[in-house]
Image (cartoon, grey):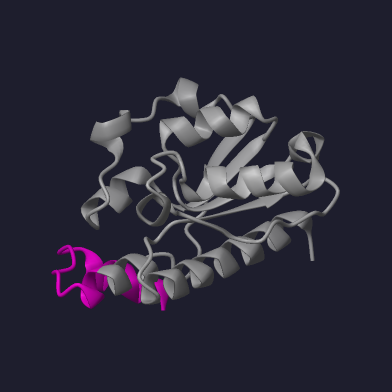
Amino acid sequence: MSGDDTLTELLTEAVAHSRRHVENGGLPFVGVVVGPDGLVSPPGFNQVRETGDPTAHAETVAIRAVAARHGPSALIGATLLATGEPCSLCYRFAADHGIERVIYAVDQDTAATWGFDYRTRVGRLTPAQRALVGGAEHRPVPGRLDPFATYLRMRGLPSPDTAPSALSKDS
């Protein structure tokens, strides 16, 4: 299995963690740091509501955990996996800590159609912001929309009109 296949597998696992987090009352965002030496962080969950910390996004939680446990140097050259495309704050935080690549399962425009429109709060991402890290890649893994659909279903909210066709592609 190639390194790229491993990253796809880990992103798919992050999506599964995200769905379980939603089932337990959380938000559908998970971040995982994969170090150049093979280090894989535990999933970082969005904890904004639980902690009241507006910076406790899934990606920053994962990055902070690696830095606390292994030191900040463990982040240099790492890849950040995210179930939802990071916001501009998280791209900046990742870049400031040496993350070289970001791979995400759901882009910010799709997240917005599912009720998570963070583009207006932190601004629509620009190519320059995405370029803060060495590369940003949208990798639409199977099941990527399941956490969003589960979140809406658990709250009795309607899914976007595109949901059935989008979900059928993931099945």
* Residue placed furthest toward the front: 51
Residue 96 x, y percent position in the rendering = 62, 25
In the displayed structure, does residue 13 sit left or right of residue 41?
left
- Is residue 165 on the magenta stretch? yes
Q: Splitting the image into 4 quarters, where does residue 47 fall?
A: bottom left
Residue 159 x, y percent position in the rendering = 18, 68
> Which residue is drawn at the image coordinates 61% and 28% (left, top)?
95
- Start-end of magenta stretch: 152-171
Report how many numbered discs are placed on residues in the image: 0
> Which residue is drawn at the image coordinates 71% and 47% (left, top)?
66
Image vertical order of residue 15 relative to residue 40, above or below: below
Task: Classify the position of the C terminus by image quarter.
Answer: bottom left
Residue 99 x, y percent position in the rendering = 67, 35
In the displayed structure, does residue 56 sit left or right of residue 13?
left
Tell me if I can see residue 86 in this picture.
yes
Image vertical order of residue 140 relative to residue 21, above or below: above
* Residue placed furthest toward the top: 128
Tell me if I can see residue 77 in this picture.
no
Q: Nearer the viewer, residue 137 or 98?
A: 98
Image vertical order of residue 78 relative to residue 91, above or below: below
